[in-house]
Amino acid sequence: MITAFQTHFHWSNLTQAFLELKRILKPDGIILLACEWSKLAYYLPDFTKQEKLENYLTDLDLHLIDSQRKDQWILYKIMKK
């Protein structure tokens, strides 16, 4: 399992970062990304629309398996395809 809490919107190259996470992730591993909704909306506004995030991840051979929003927080669970 790889976790990133309140960090992914500061990655200088988001695509390169996801590709590196995919590279080091075990075949059945999970990436957990979590942050405050307001920060996601500010730094990565396209990803507030789940379909856009799913399409982005699909292009990287990753799969959004779950997302949960509670109060001001959002959590994404991502696996390799």
Image (tube, rainbow, N blue to C red):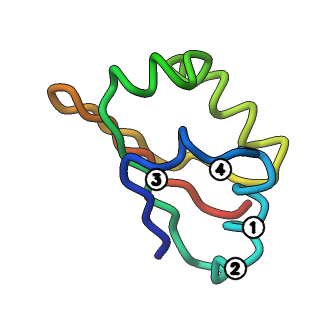
Which of the numbered marks, if any, corresponds to residue 63?
4
Can you say which quadrant of the picture contains the C terminus? bottom right
Q: Is residue 14 above or below residue 53?
A: below
Q: Secondary structure at mark 4?
A: strand
Q: Secondary structure at mark 3?
A: strand
> What is the spatial separation of the Cα atoms under label 4 and label 2, in whole angstroms?
16 Å
> What is the spatial separation of the Cα atoms under label 4 and label 1, in whole angstroms?
15 Å
Task: State yes or no: discs 1 and 2 in contact (Cβ < 8 Å).
Answer: yes
The residue that disc 3 covers is 77
> Which mark is first along the chain, 2 or 3?
2
The residue type indicated by label 3 comes to: Lys
> What is the spatial separation of the Cα atoms under label 1 and label 3, in whole angstroms?
16 Å
Task: State yes or no: discs 1 and 3 in contact (Cβ < 8 Å).
Answer: no
**Of residues 37 and 13, which is closer to you in this image?**
13
Callout 2 environment at 10 Å: few (<14), some (14 to 19), or many (20+)?
A: few
> Which mark is first along the chain, 1 or 4?
1
The residue type indicated by label 1 comes to: Glu
Foreground mark, 4 or 2?
2
Task: State yes or no: discs 3 and 2 in contact (Cβ < 8 Å).
Answer: no
> Which mark is first along the chain, 3 or 4?
4
Q: Secondary structure at mark 1?
A: helix
The residue that disc 1 covers is 20
